[in-house]
Image: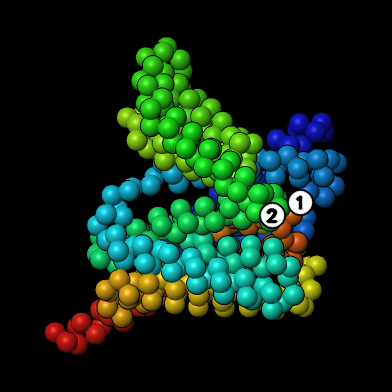
Amino acid sequence: MSTFLELALLIALILMAAKLAGYFSVRLGQPSVLGELLVGILLGPSLLNILHLPFLHHGEQLGETIQELGELGVLLLMFIAGLELHLDELTSNTKVSAYAGIMGVLVPVGMGAVTGLAFGLTTEAALFMGLTLGATSVSISAQTLMELKQLRTRVGLGLLGAAVFDDVMIILLLSIFLAVFSGGTSLVGILLIFVKMIFFLGGAVAFGIYLLPKIVRINEKLPISQRTLALGLVILLFYGIAAELIGGMAAITGTFLAGLMFARTATKEKLMQGVSALAYGLFVPIFFVSIGLAVNIRDMSTSALWLTLAVIVVAVISKFLGSGLGARWAGFSWRESWQMGAGMISRGEVGLIVANVGIGAGLVNGDEFSAIVGMVLATTIITPPFLRALFTAQEKVNEKAA
């Protein structure tokens, strides 16, 4: 077979396996991302090693192509995250959202970095490990709270708001970290980094506020098929490119910002439909599977397994305590605070996006990357039953009191 036919076959196999795994994962009460990630690990060198099967003669080249398609999936995911952001969710519980969100980042980042240093990681790798622990994927908790009919309660709304603070903080911290890591640590170098970041952010926001709405209105009048989707893709890609070349930041920061800017336009819903179909139909499943393909459990050393276990424990405890105490200081009861803490534990796709940036930038090695992926898997599995148990226990207490 030609290289193109091999690529077509590989994409077909990956999509079929990812969607089937996602289906069974949902049937078992877990998010689809869990199944897609697990099937990636099974297809990778840990078990089947699909890129080196006898009928694929260009495995290395195909692996690079799949990785690049997965990168596009990351950019689309972050664009959707910005597009979905409801700033009004911050206003209803601003104090608790801010306290729980900020503490839910600072405590895991600190504890994660200390854990990394304790296991002999370099300072850069340890700090990056901390950043991956600071991430949160609240979609998994939101799904559980919807099933329990608790999403519109104080805890549910506080959780949604805290996740917004968490996402924004992690993206900013990641961008600053990558910029400083690549630009040196001299005073002049750091000042230059911040000047570049501010220049990009200021220009991107100004463009989004003043020019983008006008461009959208003109675009909607043109007789072009799929004009809204095409414009959205062009803008998000340019924002991602500008973030790296001008701002010295991660491309995901640019696409996230592009999503925020498009969220203010009248075409938001139409754009969301088009981008979501493209992302979740093709690129996002490839991204999750590509993460699994990069994990090699067979070659993990004993020390790497201990690191994975330690990272999982620290990830659960740090987020539970950090967000929980933040909510308590903001005025929530102890019961509500621990429910908030439990809801913030899952790292999900956000943790994977951060991890992917790290391995792409050479900040973590294979074992450290595998430990992060293991942590994402574990926290994704733990969160729904833990959250459900806390709410169920409270319901029993209320029934006895009644």
Tell me the CA gap for discs 2 and 1: 45 Å
Q: x, y percentage for residue 19?
A: 55, 49
Q: Residue at x 53, y 27 (%)?
A: 234
Q: Position of residue 67 (x, y in %)?
A: 70, 45
> Which image quadrant for residue 3?
top right
Task: From the top left corner, tell me how far across and down residue 179 is, in percent.
Answer: 64, 49
**Mark 1 Cα-neighbour bin, 10 Å: few <14, some 14–19, many ≥20:** many
Which disc number belongs to residue 50? 1
Q: Nearer the viewer, residue 211 or 266?
A: 211
Q: Are marks 2 and 1 in contact (CB under 8 Å)?
A: no
* Residue positioned 37% across, 72% down in the render: 326
Q: Is residue 57 left or right of residue 211?
A: right
Of the image marks 2 and 1, the number of the one nearer the N terminus: 1
Q: Is residue 285 visible?
A: no
Disc 1, SS? helix
| Mark toward the viewer: 2 or 1 | 2
Q: Residue at x 72, y 61 (%)?
A: 364
What type is the residue that disc 1 sits on?
Answer: Ile
Q: Position of residue 354 (x, y in %)?
A: 59, 55
Q: Amino acid at mark 2?
A: Ser
Farthest-out residue, top: 223
Question: SS class of the residue under badge 2?
Answer: loop
Between residues 11 and 395, which one lies in front from this camera angle? 395
Asked whether 231 or 247 is in front, the reply is 247
Q: Quadrant of the N terminus?
A: top right
Report the residue marked by disc 2: 186
Q: Quadrant of residue 340?
A: bottom left
Residue lying furthest bottom: 400
Q: Quadrant of the C terminus?
A: bottom left
Q: Residues within 10 Å of mark 2 (few under 14, many from 20)?
A: few
